[in-house]
Every structure is written in C-alpha cells, then in structure tokens.
Image (cartoon, rainbow, N blue to C red):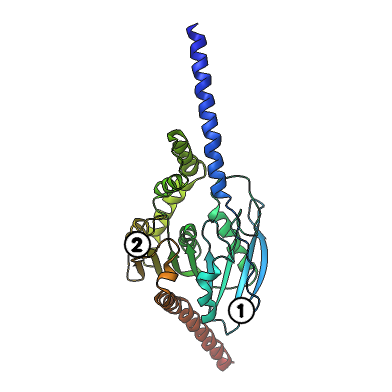
Amino acid sequence: MIIIWILFILAVGISILLYNGVKSYRWVYRLTHPVRYTQQPNTKAFYTYKKFTFQTNDGITLAGIDYCPKTACIGTVLVCHFLGGSKEAVLMFVDFLLMHGYRVLCYDNRNHGESETAEGVRATLDQDFSAFYQAIREMGIKGPYGIMGFSMGASVALRAMQKYPDICAAVTDSGPMMFAKNYFRYVLNNKKIRNPLQRILFLCIFLYYAGFAKMERETYRTLKQLKGNPVLMIHGKKDTIISPDDPCLAYSLLKSPNAALWLIPRARHLMNRFNKPTEYVERILAFFDQNIAIKIHNEENSADLAQRKCLWEE
C-alpha cells in the first residue's frame, strides 16, 4: 500500500512538473517568436534601398536591406534591431545617418520581419549576425564599418565588433543586457506570471537551455577585450526593461578615453532619440565622423598617394 502511495505521489509530481514545464516553454516560445513588424520603406524618401536574402549556417533564410543615401556616401553603418523589431522598424532611429551620407545595412533576425521562422528557442543572435556580415562581404561592401545595436542588438553589436576587425566603432542604445536574470524577471512580472514553479522553469529555460546565461558571460569577456576601442553607449535613466546598471557595468569594463556613456535623465527604453533628438543626432554623427568617415578619407588619400608614387616611379 505504501509503494502505491509513493508511486501515486511521484506520478502527481511529475504531472505537475510537466504541465508547468510545457506552459513555461510556451511563454519562452512566444517571447522568442514575437508578432512580426511589417512595414515597407518610403519609396519617395531621401534614400534608395534594395532588399536581399542570405542563409545562416543552419539553413535558415534571413532578409536584409541596403539603404543608400542619395548624396555621396561617406561610410557604412551596420544596424542590429531590438526584440520584436525589424530592418524597417529601426529606420526611424537611424534615418539621420542616411541624411548625413552614411550607407545603412540592416537585417531581420530569425522569427522577425521577413526572415524565416525557426521552431527552436535557442539563442542564435550571433549566428544570424555572422551570416549577415558574410553576405555583405560577398556583396562587395567593404569596411571599415560602424555598427549600431538597439536593446538586445546592443550585445550583438559589441560581440561583432570584437570578432570582426573591420567594425571600427560601435554605438549601443538601450543595452547591452548584462544582467539577463533581471531582464527575464521583468518579463515575468510584466506578463503577470505569479506561479513560482513556472517562474523558475521559465528562467531555467531562457538562461540555460536557450543560452542567455552563456551570452551574458560572452558579452562580459568581449567588453574586457574591447577596452580602448571607440564605443558610445546611450541609455535612459528611466529604463525599466534593461536597467541603467547594465550599461554602467559594461562601461566600467571597457572604460577608456575612446569610450563614452551618456545616461539620459528622463528617457525610457528605446526612447533616447525622442527624448533628446538634437543632441542624440549630433553625438552619434560626431562619433561616426571621427571614427569612420575620417578613417575612410585618410585611407583613400593614402591609397591615392601610393598610386601616384607608383606612377612617378614608372
């Protein structure tokens, strides 16, 4: 009789665990497969654009877009969008780059925009960016590049800068995420998930199965390796989604004369440009002009001088 009761209790316990596990996994799936942002660029704007597709090394087809200014191009900036965003959604944040003469290339992460859906929930942000970077290199678009990352895209931008030497300057807005557990607790509270078992399982799936704890550690190591590189970090002091503590820690790891942290007093998540519109534009343009446009100009002058020298020697 005791064995029967033990088996019954075990069966009930396993059933409860499975039920809550499935429910937690569904929450994770919904967050990693958000409602898609679908909007077409303005065809009568101050830029032209061309869409393209490319594949990741695990066979997922992603969508990209190449925005070109109608004026002379002074450099190229790569852009990584936020969770639930797309290559079109970020245009409102970076259109001033096009007006100033920068070429802007963006892409949709899997499960976003016009990119293909992947059924799993494992984090593949770096994998998707690597495929994007390879695609633009194959298109003949040469560096040096600047890079901008928004929210979850901020961490991607920083890790990309460390991996690819052609990415010479990075701007982060509302990121990077340094305390992943705090962010996912915010999500749980925002979704009003009170069940303690579901909360634990949700965190375990995201942090250890999806791989966000590993990504957090990789970002930490990346920032140490980037010390001395040009990085401009912009964050709102009223950001309740990714706390200002995150960029403050990131800045302390890469602090140098070439790094800057601008905390905007009343700005919330992804609202920095709209809170301080003029200063936001001026700071980013000055940063990219100094670290990308001038660099390209100097390299072109050096190449021109080298070519003239060859002609003289002939």
Q: Which residue is mark 1?
A: 45
Number of other residues with Cα within 10 Å of mark 1, as a class: few under 14, some 14 to 19, many 20 or more? few
The amino acid beneath tag 2 is Lys
Dot 2 falls on a residue whose secondary structure is loop
Q: Is residue 108 above or below residue 1?
A: below
Give the x, y percent position of residue 23. 54, 36
Q: Is residue 213 left or right of residue 98?
A: left
Which residue is painted at 47% across and 8% down in the image?
Answer: 2
Q: Is residue 29 visible?
A: yes
Q: Is residue 291 left or right of residue 116?
A: left
Q: Is residue 276 left or right of residue 167?
A: left
Dot 1 falls on a residue whose secondary structure is loop
What residue occupies the far top of the structure in this picture?
1
Q: Which residue is mark 2?
A: 237
Q: Is residue 171 above or below residue 295?
A: above
Which residue is painted at 49% across and 11% down in the image?
Answer: 5
The answer to which of marks 1 and 2 sits earlier in the sequence is 1
Instruction: Kindly identify which numbered label has been placed on residue 212.
Output: none
Q: Could you give the CA–CA distance between mark 1 and mark 2, rounded to whole angstroms?
A: 33 Å
What residue occupies the far bottom of the structure in this picture?
312
- Across the whole image, how many numbered discs are drawn on residues? 2
Which residue is painted at 53% across and 90% down in the image?
Answer: 309
Q: Quadrant of the rendered structure where residue 54 is?
A: bottom right
Give the x, y percent position of residue 91. 55, 70
Give the x, y percent position of residue 192. 45, 43
Q: Is residue 209 above or below residue 44?
A: above
What residue occupies the far front of the structure in this picture?
192
The amino acid beneath tag 1 is Ala
Q: Is residue 101 visible?
A: no
Q: Quadrant of the rendered structure where residue 314 is?
A: bottom right
Number of other residues with Cα within 10 Å of mark 2, as a class: few under 14, some 14 to 19, many 20 or more? many
